[in-house]
Image (cartoon, grey):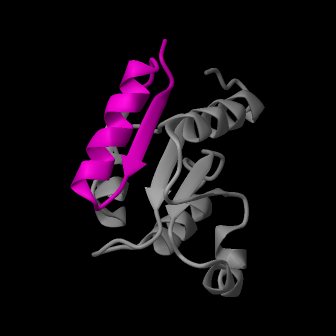
Amino acid sequence: MASRILIVEDEPQLLQAITIRLTAAGFSCETASNGREALQKLEGWVPDLIIADLLMPVMDGYTLVKQLKSEARTAAVPIIVLTAVPDHALAHRAEELKGTCVLRKPFETQELLATLRAMLAATPGGTS
């Protein structure tokens, strides 16, 4: 069975591009355009991994990560955070992103796939 990935990104073209590339690589993808929509989707299922942008309207990635880590059902789900936020700004909020993998925008598809597969392989019961 394909690993299930939730992609949370407010930029429609990037969301579509990531979804197409991950689906072509054999992953099953669900999408959301902000953190609140992601939490609503998560009411019915728990993905194997979450990819989330940091800066989004309605609910940003920082708040989403905090919510996910605070709930027993989703606390162990690996998270890849996508961002173009400068390093110095990220450093001020590093504690909020503890336990996530930060991937800098722009990124290459192969970099995303390698990171995703490594995180899934490191998760108990994880597959890629």
Displayed quadrant of residue 53: bottom left
Kindly tell me whether residue 125 is visible in this rendering: yes
Q: Nearest the camera: 122 or 20?
A: 20
Residue drawn at point x = 61 percent, y = 40 percent? 111
> Where is the C terminus found, in terms of image quarters?
top right
Residue drawn at point x = 59 percent, y = 79 percent? 86
Horizontally, residue 7 falls left or right of residue 126, namely left
Residue drawn at point x = 49 percent, y = 57 percent? 106
Give the magenta range.
Answer: 1-27
Image position, residue 7 (x, y; %): 39, 46
Q: Is 94 above or below relative to 79?
A: below
Image position, residue 98 (x, y; %): 72, 66
Q: Is residue 24 magenta?
A: yes
**Residue at the farthest left position:** 12
Image position, residue 21 (x, y; %): 39, 30
Horizontally, residue 24 falls left or right of residue 90, namely left
Displayed quadrant of residue 91: bottom right
Q: Is residue 104 magenta?
A: no
Kindly tell me whether residue 28 is visible in this rendering: no
Q: Nearest the camera: 25 or 124?
A: 25
Q: Is 12 above or below relative to 128?
A: below
